[in-house]
Amino acid sequence: TIANHDMKFGIREVKDYYNEDGHRGFMINGEKISIRGAGWVDNMTLDNTHEYDEVQLQYVKDMNMNTIRLEGFWGKDEHLYQRCDELGILIMVGWSCHWEWENYLGKVCDEKYGGILSDEDVSLMAGAWKDQILWLRNHPSIMSWFSGSDCIPLPKLEKLYFETFKEYDTSRVYLSSAKEWKSGEVESGVKMRGPYAYVPPVYWYADTLYGGAFGFNTETGPGAQVPPIESIRKMIPAKDLWPINEMWDFHCGRNEFNTLSRYTKALNERYGEAKSVEEYARKAQLLNYELMRPMFEAFSVNRYEATGVIQWMLNSAWPEMYWQLYDSYLLPNAAYFATKKAGEPIQAIYNYEDEGVYMVNDKLEDEANMVLDIRVYNIESKLILHEILGVNIYANSAQKLYDLSGLKEKTGTYFVDLRVSREDEDIAQNFYWLSTQEDLLDYEAKVPNWYYHTPSKQYSDFLLLNTLPSSKMEQSMVSEIQGNEMVYNITLKNLNSNISFFIEMMMKDQETGETILPVYWEDNYVSLLPHEKRFLEARIPLSLVEGKNIDLIALPYNSAK
């Protein structure tokens, strides 16, 4: 007897392909898609509520990402998968690497096949694989099944996996591993070569050996993402806030990632050593933004030589300093807004390797009659280059439009402002701070494990940012109820003839001083050109702010000392 069972379902076609270099890519409904995603994890105590996960999935959409990767079973029910179905978020589902390493699994593991080696374990895992596919196969959001992470399954286990796959669901892609193994059934066609620690912006464009923008990188990122000061104060006792000590390390990762030393070294070299926890947190946001944006941009510019990238990670299981676009308190750090900026459907992008300006069109239709406005300012906020170009760009493509390499003859730190418009419509804008002192990577260095990062032998120098004149701004905010949200229309005005740089915005409860979360910002960590006025929108669930007085805190990097 078959019981009646109601369920929602969707219809879509998932296929893969291999580019000329043998790297796997993905297609949805017959169209190539540039995968932009990140690795999801549940709370450490596995007590995620639907409301908590809803905010996270809205964050994924807000960041212009299209995919999450689940390394293991996540979600105590089907809510996560149902909401991804409804929101159009793709899911890569698969086993955890914790079943492949002896120090995690607690039993002997094979370098190639992991820890599932005995007949008893093979039978157990074959059953778990079948249960997973039968449980989740009706969710159209799922685009792939991983049967391994760092390893591939034992051949006799993979044979059972593949038999189940062929019998119960061939409507999405089978991947034997997140790493570039060739198994008995299929060559993975993806890569997992790191990095997981600090690398400079140019790395993603220049690297052709490891994690750079070629192929499909199943997990990678520039390392730590230190949260804003509000979260640091929550996780670190007051007596340990400064200087950085073992309490900070406790909130880092394991093994090679149990310290902020590489991150802090880069922060000190690029922006100058911080003298307080507040200064460190502000400079950390500069570093977070500067390092995260070019990773996603490079994979977009190099489409489809580069087919996709999964940031390691999206979120954190508990309060920490590593691998997160927002923390467990749901407070975004600047890497969140860098990801959002990099993923805008039409965008002008600066290539850190060839110093060109590229246009990217992520849409499935051609875009015409646009204008690209390129402005370059020196550290004194003086305009040193201004070009206006007409732009037409094909669907789902990237194109180089301008060369800025001559600016290397200038001295010190400078700014590049890129804006795309059409008639009276502002489409996109992107703002970069750059240095004539290049980042140089040391591919020949003898490090304990190059897998995790490629060391630097020279850092870009942004110390002149600390000499920017203090910014004077006007700000105003009006609100209105729209459905179940309070919408705030914000006006920022730069009163100076110098750039108001890297403005961090927060919403605070006027009575308690607490930061309001979540807030869905149109943009954040913005910079204003001399005397520029900017209009931005922020949305907050009505239930969080109804009856409260809300203050907007807008703090430029060059705020009055």
Image: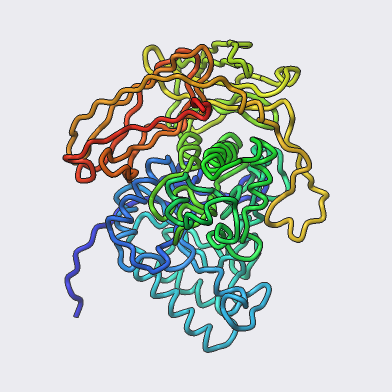
How many tags in the picture?
Answer: 0
Q: Is residue 476 above or below residue 63?
A: above
Q: Is residue 336 above or below residue 330?
A: above
* Quarter holding residue 440: top right
From the viewer's perspective, is 560 left or right of 401? left
> Quadrant of the image for the N terminus?
bottom left
* Quarter holding residue 78: bottom left
Foreground residue among 127 and 258: 258
Foreground residue among 4 and 475: 475
For the point 18% across and 75% down, the residue is: 3
Percent across and percent down for residue 101 are: 61, 74
Residue lying furthest bottom? 120
Foreground residue among 459 and 74: 459
Residue lying furthest front? 239
From the viewer's perspective, is 444 left or right of 474? right
Percent across and percent down for residue 451 are: 70, 57
Foreground residue among 259 and 1: 259
For the point 64% across and 35% down, the residue is: 271
Percent across and percent down for residue 522 are: 37, 32
Residue 303 in view in this figure? no
Q: Is residue 558 above or below residue 410?
A: below
From the viewer's perspective, is 151 left or right of 518? right
State how the image is colored: rainbow
For the point 79% across and 45% down, the residue is: 442
Percent across and percent down for residue 214 are: 64, 44
For the point 67% across and 45% down, the residue is: 199
Q: Is residue 303 above or below residue 25?
A: above
